[in-house]
Image: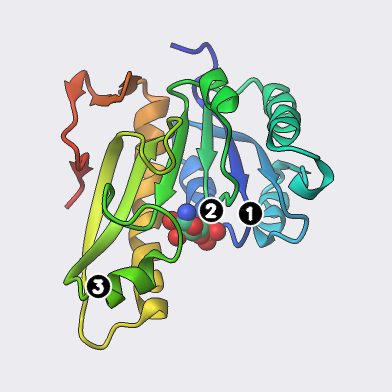
Amino acid sequence: MHNNHRSIVVLISGNGSNLQAIMDNSANGNYRISGVISNKADAYGLIRAQQSNIATQVIDHKQYASRDLFDNALTKAIDEYNPGLIVLAGFMRILGADFVKHYQGRILNIHPSLLPAYPGTNTHQRVLDAGEKQHGVSVHFVTEELDGGPVIAQEAIAIEPSDDADSLAEKIHQKEHILYPTVVSWFADGRLRLDGNDAYLNERLLPESGERLS
Ligand code: GRF
């Protein structure tokens, strides 16, 4: 296990409500947020972090000529905190293979769908357009395949006839704010492990849909 696995760095691009939930939980939790890095200078999550006296940094992808150069700058900034875990919380950049390899088994992402269904963006509208009855959120290990790493945990919600993309986003966020800090705590306690394309919780191989909290 990484020697500093209770220390985490959170990567964001926007509002940072998941970051907030992870910060709030860290007060009684078993992990500590060493730094928050955004690729956008105007991400509201940076203000949230500063209000909690957490170090912040902006690494603007537009300042780099290639993905590799951006990823290198990001890696350098992250490694200064020597974290055990990298938490992607609404981070809207795709990370290259070298980045993922560098932090093998130590990157988590939250995605607003019941993966493997609906990878990619705009998931709320897409589930509505497809006439789905169910939607949800997944926390997964990041591997080289976009939104394709093994699922650790999921929460489902029912889609009502009155729902639109905004109401779904709201319902999903409520689930996310419980699910993500929970999974981060599991990792901090050394209960989670990635092996190839398999996720283990307490040394138990998780099914394709991960663990369901409810
Ligand atoms: C969340 O819905 C998450 O699933 C997706 O981006 C959104 C981030 O929201 N990856 P916030 O910035 O944490 O409020």
Q: CA distance from mark 2 to mark 1?
A: 6 Å
Q: Amino acid at mark 2?
A: Gly
Q: For label 1, count other residues whose C-alpha is less than 10 Å away and answer few (under 14), some (14-19) or many (20+).
A: many
Mark 2 sits near ligand 1, with its Cβ under 8 Å away: yes
- The reply to whether discs 2 and 1 touch (Cβ–Cβ < 8 Å) is yes
- SS of the residue at dot 2? loop
The label on residue 90 is 2
In the picture shown, does residue 5 fall above or below 62? above
Looking at the rendered structure, the secondary structure element under dot 3 is: loop
**Quadrant of residue 163 in the image?**
bottom left
Q: Residue at x 37, y 52 (%)?
A: 119
At x 40%, y 44%, the residue is 147
Q: Earlier in the sequence, mark 3 or mark 2?
A: 2
Question: Which of the labelled discs sits on residue 148, or is there none?
Answer: none
Q: Is residue 27 left or right of residue 77?
A: left
Tell me where residue 77 sits by quadrant: top right
Q: Give the Cα distance between marks 1 and 3.
A: 28 Å
Return the residue nearer the eye: 153 or 117.
117
* Cβ at disc 3 under 8 Å from ligand 1: no
- For the point 22% across and 22% down, the residue is 202
Query: Relative to 33, does residue 213 appear above or below in the rendering?
Result: below
What residue is disc 3 on?
Answer: 130
Of discs 1 and 3, which sits in the foreground?
3
Does residue 154 appear to the left or right of 207 in the view shown? right
Q: Secondary structure at mark 1?
A: loop
Q: Is mark 1 within 8 Å of ligand 1?
A: yes
Q: Position of residue 73 (x, y in %)?
A: 76, 31
142 on left or right of 71: left
Determine the CA span between mark 3 and mark 2: 24 Å
Compared to residue 21, the image places residue 148 above or below, namely above
The numbered disc on residue 13 is: 1
Earlier-in-chain disc, 2 versus 1: 1
